[in-house]
Image (spheres, grey):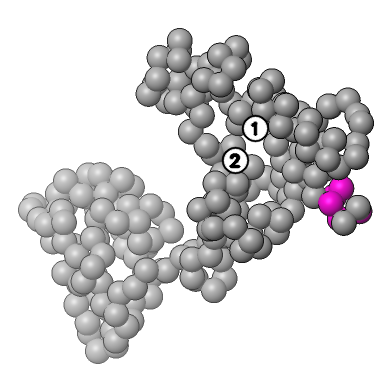
Amino acid sequence: MGKRIKFWLDNWTDNGSLAEKFPTLFQLSNDKEASLDKMGMWDGHAWCWVFSRNRVLRGRNTGLLAKMYAILSRVQLDKETEDMLVWKANNIERFLVKSLYGLLNPSPSLNTIFSFRAIWRGLVPSKVEVFGWTAIINKINTRNMLVKRGILDTSAANCLICLVEEEMVDHLFIHCYKHWLIWSKIINWCGLAWCWQVSSLSRTLWFMENFRKKHG
């Protein structure tokens, strides 16, 4: 129990790390990298916390210690259970790609436009599915994105294919005039003739998926 968890440094409570919440107590601690099991002892079946410090607490610091103990009192430790990693983004406490997507993109707007079931079908290699997913949620490291992160100079933001506009996800896959030639062939192959009014990759794929369902 608690041998792998850093008492002060890890986010093992609902309040973030104790070192960040109680910096004064952290500085007074004798062992700033102590594991959880070194910060107390078992009294029968009850765990008693022990704060080892390098000098006597006075004034405001005693109140801080009481607040920290109040937080610790809500933590239930198990004497027999071994430490394990738990995924808190879902009810089953196990990692799922779907729950990770929910954290990365909490807005439901895309789901109302495009069904991700069209991607996760196993029809192509998994790396292709992941690439398609990252493109839909606008997480590809386009040149525009790399400029914003300071990795590329502002002069390097333009698309390397057309050299005219900034390389963003929608431009890269739809609006680049050279890529539009590919879309034109797809539209002609589908037997369509229309003005291109779709502004985003997700809406484009939504349209193509629904057209496929209707015309099989």
- The residue closer to the viewer here, 56 or 183, is 183
Q: Is the magenta region chiefly helix, strand or loop?
A: helix
- Up-down relation of residue 72 to residue 214 (above or below): below
Q: Residue at x 21, y 71 (%)?
A: 3
Q: Quadrant of residue 77?
A: bottom left
Residue 176 lies, in percent from the top left, at 66, 22
Q: Which residue is mark 1?
A: 173
Residue 146 magenta-drawn?
Answer: no
Q: Label 2, on which residue?
A: 135
Neighbor class of circle 1 (other Cα within 10 Å; few <14, some 14-19, many 20+) is some
Q: Badge 2: few (under 14), some or many (20 or more) residues near its Cα, within 10 Å? A: some
Which quadrant holds the C terminus?
Answer: bottom right
Residue sitting at x 64%, y 42%: 136
Residue 190 seen from this side? yes
Q: Is residue 26 left or right of residue 207?
A: left
- Which segment is the magenta one? 210-214
Q: Amino acid at mark 1?
A: Phe
The N terminus sits in image quarter: bottom left
Of residue 78 and residue 65, the one placed in the foreground of this image is 78
Q: Position of residue 23 (x, y in %)?
A: 25, 44
x and y, in percent, of residue 7 in the image: 24, 61
The residue under the point 16% across, 61% down is 34
Question: Looking at the rendered structure, which numbered label has been put on residue 35?
Answer: none
103 w.r.t. 171: above or below? below
Q: Are marks 1 and 2 in contact (CB under 8 Å)?
A: yes
Q: Secondary structure at mark 2?
A: helix
Residue 63, x across and y down, in percent:
30, 52
Q: Quadrant of residue 41?
A: bottom left
